[in-house]
Image (cartoon, rainbow, N blue to C red):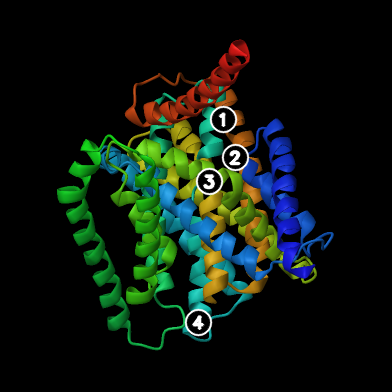
Amino acid sequence: MESYKYLLDIALILISTKILGLLTRRIQLPQVVGALIAGLLLGPACFGVLQETDFIKNIAEIGVIVLMFAAGLETDVQELKKTGLASFIIALLGVIVPLIGGYFVATIYNPVTDQQTMLQNIFVGVVLTATSVSITVETLKELGKLSTKTGNAILGAALIDDVLGIIALTVISSFAGSDVSLWVILLKILGFFIFCGVVAFLFIKFVNPWINKYKKDLRRFVILAFAFCLLMSFAAEYFFGVSDITGAFVAGLILSNNKKTSYMLNRFDTVSYVLLSPVFFASVGLKVTFSNMSATVVVLTVLLLVVAILSKMIGCGLGAKICKYTNLQSVKIGIGMISRGEVALIVATKGMSMGLMKDEFFAPLVLVVVATTIVTPILLKLAYKYQASREADVPMASSLVDKVEERNDLEKITQNAANMHEEMKEIHK
């Protein structure tokens, strides 16, 4: 009987994550929050129905790799070049300030005594650097403010923020459990980026032209792309001591600019939506236990939440102000970058597996991710309500906004086509 229990575990995860995901969508929150709550309810934190087995861990690990690969595929390198200096400055300060803030809060509870404790504290800052703008995009669309100067700045900065966050993760993860010298580690990191550059050059020069011309069975590209993602993940860990999710993200970046990218991304999204994402986000909830949530840990959670909110508002807001945005626009940009999401959870989970995340920090950081997701749309709506009586937010065209809306339209078209196909079958019966 025990050998079949994993089937029941997966079924419970899928049902609970989807039901709670739909409920959270009803209150205009991402389904990720519902999946996290499902894991918390089913796991040791609440009812203890499920435990994190090796099977769930392995599925979740593949889920992380696919999520980061998809994030790389979604990152348009050409758009990255066009975002400009303003988006870069906003993103850079939006990474530096949370990194420093997270480090100092962690140091209060985990005094630095050696390299390991210092890395653990820095890693808390790395988790807080992540930004998930999906909830911000939905809120701005609801308010009709996505195609504005502020909306463009948030999208551009978020794009760069992801890349800067991955670079920070790459550097910190290279030090995990390492007794070799600093120079050897830095050379390995440099070697990794050179390796990625060479692979990218070969793909652009020789592989992309062939992919763009190929017109036959496109499903082959999905299989080959996934194999390439796994190989890059393996190479990153095995040869360079860099996190496997960094390799997956870079693999996605390399494949992000060919004519089959949308097709591949659509297929990976389907697999991720059906199985991998629910299992991963539920597994994050399964890792959380509240048995050691003492008054001290509760205070830590509150401090991390305050730092998570203020550090993005100050960092990104200051960056926007430097780039000549008005005070109100700077505040809105800062608020729009507050929400943490899947990337923060992925980084935190990776830190746990690498020994870079203290157990005491994990539950507070998961709660911070949920809280920032709830707080962001509320603050953003208040900021726009205040703005309505102060200054106009002029609409402006943007290829970044067009890309976001095109992605949503593609999903709707795909579902409508499937419905029409079923209707036609009924007519012909």
Kindly check if marks 1 and 2 are in contact, taking CB atoms under 8 A apart as contact: yes
Q: Disc 4 on helix, strand or loop?
A: helix
Q: Residue at x 48, y 31 (%)?
A: 328
Q: Residue at x 77, y 71 (%)?
A: 292
Disc 1 or 2, which lies upstream in sequence? 1
User: Residue 271, which numbered label?
Assistant: 3
Q: Position of residue 52 (x, y in %)?
A: 69, 66
Which of label 3 and label 2 is nearer to you? 3
Who is closer to the viewer here, 197 or 28? 197
- Side (left or right) of 51 relative to 100: right
Rendered image quadrant of residue 284:
bottom right
Q: Disc 1 on helix, strand or loop?
A: helix
Kindly check if marks 1 and 4 are in contact, taking CB atoms under 8 A apart as contact: no
Q: Name which residue type carries label 1.
A: Thr
- Side (left or right) of 191 relative to 397: left
Disc 2: CA contacts within 10 A as few (<14), some (14-19) or many (>=20): many
Identify the residue position indicated by label 4 in the image: 116
Q: Residue at x 23, y 55 (%)?
A: 200
Which of label 4 and label 3 is nearer to you? 3
Disc 1 or 4, which lies upstream in sequence? 4
User: Residue 139, which numbered label?
Assistant: 1
User: Residue 163, which numbered label?
Assistant: none
Q: Name which residue type carries label 2.
A: Thr
Q: Is residue 33 above or below residue 406?
A: below
Q: Position of residue 174 (x, y in %)?
A: 39, 74
- Distance of label 1 from label 3 (alpha carbons): 27 Å
- Distance of label 1 from label 4 (alpha carbons): 40 Å
Q: Name which residue type carries label 3.
A: Val
Which quadrant would the C terminus be assigned to in this image?
A: top right
Q: Name which residue type carries label 4.
A: Gln
Identify the residue position indicated by label 2 in the image: 376
Disc 4 or 2, which lies upstream in sequence? 4
